[in-house]
Image: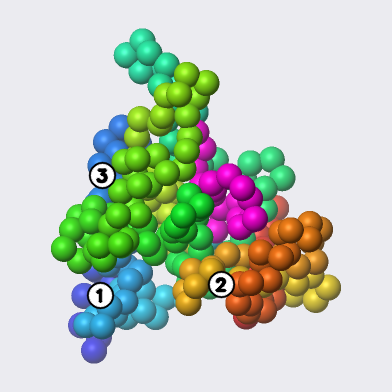
């Protein structure tokens, strides 16, 4: 058992090294490196019928950083909660590109840590025809960008997202983004994961519950979900009419002070 544990620890460290190396290449402009990033994340995080994830085999007690903006399903426009869109100069021309939101928090943005299931299945894209979670994105890219293991309907919805601009983004000249939004999302997911691993070394053992503040998880389907504050914001009747159609599970909101000026919020059970 000791030897097996040592081998798993070595494999864990290898995967973290692969992940960090691929991130470096990605940041140098090699965006297809997102495939390697996704593969490492799948090995570390994803359970199958035949195998358990590396994080479960090692009994890693991790809570996961969600850097996404609060998703509102009643928004008439598509949502991409981990990304930004910018015009940049490329070869002397102005082009539109998706970029990962890595400098978080931005302004008064709230950052939340969540349980794995809530984080993994949180909606991060909504093109108003389909919603996509971190799990959807990571597994789709890891499975060779829609290879043999991908459901045909899911493959079609991803094609609309990645190749046919189902998010509907363009500039005043009608120019659409020149890169793949899900590769950029993979980059953010990897960043969230590495921060989660690092912060959980410090632990969230002294967290304090906000008894007067309430959060929920609202479910779009059996697994896909979004975090929803019930006491922190006011909503229109139109928004609540849509949200009320989604199954609800209660969550508690906690605050963790690390003692170095850093404070985080945790949405837990």
Residue 199 on image: x %, y %: 53, 61
Residue to which mark 2 is pinned? 219
At horizontal 69% and vertical 76% (from top left) the residue drawn is 252
Location of mark 1 (residue) = 8
Secondary structure category for the residue under label 3 = helix
Position of residue 234 in the picture relative to residue 178 (left or right): right
* Camera-side mark, 2 or 3: 2
- Circle 3 packing at 10 Å, graded few (<14), some (14-19), many (20+), is many
Figure quadrant of the N terminus:
bottom left
71 magenta-colored = yes
Q: Which residues are magenta?
A: 66-85
Q: Position of residue 112 (x, y in %)?
A: 61, 61
- The answer to whether one can see residue 10 in this image is yes
Looking at marks 3 and 1 on the same chain, the residue that comes earlier in the sequence is marked by: 1
Horizontal side of 97 relative to 112 (left or right) equals: left
Residue picked out by circle 3: 33
Is label 2 in contact with label 3 (beta carbons under 8 Å)? no
- Residue 224 included in the magenta stretch of the image: no
Residue drawn at x 52%, y 21% is 172
Quadrant assignment, res 197? bottom left
């Amino acid at each position: 058992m000791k030897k097996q544990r040592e081998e798993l620890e070595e494999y864990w460290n290898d995967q973290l090294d692969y992940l960090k190396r691929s991130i470096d290449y990605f940041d140098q402009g090699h965006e297809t490196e997102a495939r390697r990033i996704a593969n490492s994340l799948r090995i570390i995080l994803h359970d199958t019928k035949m195998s358990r994830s590396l994080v479960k085999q090692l009994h890693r007690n991790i809570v996961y950083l969600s850097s996404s903006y609060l998703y509102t399903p009643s928004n008439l426009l598509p949502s991409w909660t981990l990304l930004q869109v910018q015009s940049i100069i490329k070869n002397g021309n102005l082009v539109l590109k998706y970029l990962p939101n890595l400098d978080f928090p931005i302004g008064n943005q709230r950052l939340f840590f969540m349980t794995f299931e809530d984080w993994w299945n949180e909606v991060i894209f909504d093109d108003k025809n389909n919603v996509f979670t971190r799990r959807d994105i990571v597994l789709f890219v890891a499975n060779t960008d829609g290879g043999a293991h991908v459901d045909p309907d899911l493959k079609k919805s991803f094609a609309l997202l990645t190749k046919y601009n189902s998010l509907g983004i363009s500039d005043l000249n009608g120019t659409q983004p020149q890169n793949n939004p899900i590769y950029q999302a993979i980059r953010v997911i990897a960043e969230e994961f590495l921060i989660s691993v690092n912060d959980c070394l410090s632990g969230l053992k002294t967290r304090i519950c906000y008894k007067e503040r309430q959060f929920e998880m609202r479910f779009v389907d059996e697994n896909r979900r979004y975090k929803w504050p019930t006491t922190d914001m006011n909503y229109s009747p139109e928004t609540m009419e849509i949200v009320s159609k989604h199954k609800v599970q209660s969550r508690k909101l906690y605050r963790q002070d690390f003692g170095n000026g850093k404070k985080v919020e945790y949405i837990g059970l």
